[in-house]
Image: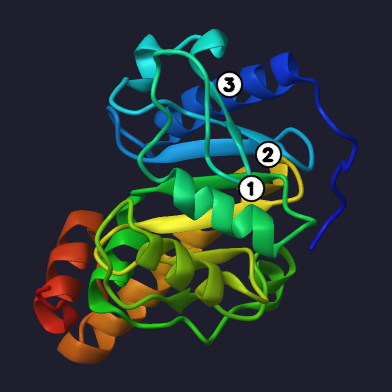
Amino acid sequence: MGNAKSSELSLGQAQTSVWESGIRLLKEGFVARTWGNISIRVNETLFVITPSGIGYEALTPEMIVPVAIDDLSYEGTIKPSSEKRLHQAIYRDRQEIRAVVHTHQSAASSVSASRKDIVEVTREASEIIGPYVRTTAYALPGTSRLATLATQAIRGSNAALLAHHGAVCIGRDMDEAFEVCKCLESLCQAFVEKAVEKATGKSPYKSGMVHRTYLDQHGQRH
């Protein structure tokens, strides 16, 4: 799945990397306002993560919160993301992973709403993501159940979909995790277009119509 750096970052380097990645993801349209969250493993005992309730435009590197992997403790008045358990669970389960990104990107969110797995992955995508993309059962945001389901779904892959809740992408560094996000969006876009064409007999040509039609055909309420 490509080469990646494995050396430990300093706390300041990790905070800056998360901050810069938030801006990149915002520009790509993968996160918005206070939605989504990003983290980097600093070492075996610590990760840093975006704070709760603060928009990406207002963030500074110093506002990225250091959190203990063992008990999720942190210092200071800025609270870490409510999805910190999700990041903790992945870092505990996948020792090689150093970056976790939870997004609400458009095509991936559409597929997550249908609760379908993607089992047909192109060779090129499999080199970045892995052989499949699983979708979890629905769980409330920020809960231990969501963390457990996501950790199970992402085993053997670098991406998973969270039912009605977007996607989680991981990597051995932040650059790899970012590439997984972009690859996942392309893969989900193709998945949606194929499903719409199969259901309607017509080739879709407008992204907004694609997602609305797909959800009308396949979406489920929770």
Q: Is residue 47 left or right of residue 192?
A: right
Measure the alpha-carbon separation of dots 1 and 2: 5 Å
Of 52 and 210, nearer the camera is: 52
Provide residue 60's location: percent of width, then percent of height. Answer: 49, 9
Which residue does the image show at 47% across and 54% down from the upper left?
86
Q: Is residue 193 left or right of residue 131?
A: left
Q: Please say which color scheme the image uses.
A: rainbow
Amino acid type of the residue that numbered disc 2 sits on in the rendered structure: Met
Mark 1 touching mark 2, by CB under 8 A? yes
Q: Is residue 88 left or right of residue 50?
A: right
Amino acid type of the residue that numbered disc 3 sits on in the rendered structure: Glu
Q: Residues within 10 Å of mark 2 (few under 14, many from 20)?
A: many
Residue that badge 2 annotates? 174
Which residue does the image show at 63% across and 46% down from the upper left?
70
Q: Secondary structure at mark 2?
A: helix
Residue that badge 3 annotates? 20
> How many numbered callouts?
3
Amino acid type of the residue that numbered disc 1 sits on in the rendered structure: Ala
Residue that badge 1 annotates? 177
Observer able to see residue 180: no
Of 143 and 205, nearer the camera is: 143
Provide residue 57's location: percent of width, then percent of height. Answer: 37, 14
Measure the alpha-carbon separation of dots 3 and 2: 10 Å
Observer able to see residue 171: yes
Provide residue 125's location: percent of width, then percent of height. Answer: 64, 68
Q: Residues within 10 Å of mark 3 (few under 14, many from 20)?
A: some
Which residue does the image show at 52% across and 45% down from the upper left?
101
Rendered image quadrant of residue 215 = bottom left
Give the answer, above or below, for where 111 lies relative to 217.
above
Q: Residues within 10 Å of mark 1 (few under 14, many from 20)?
A: many
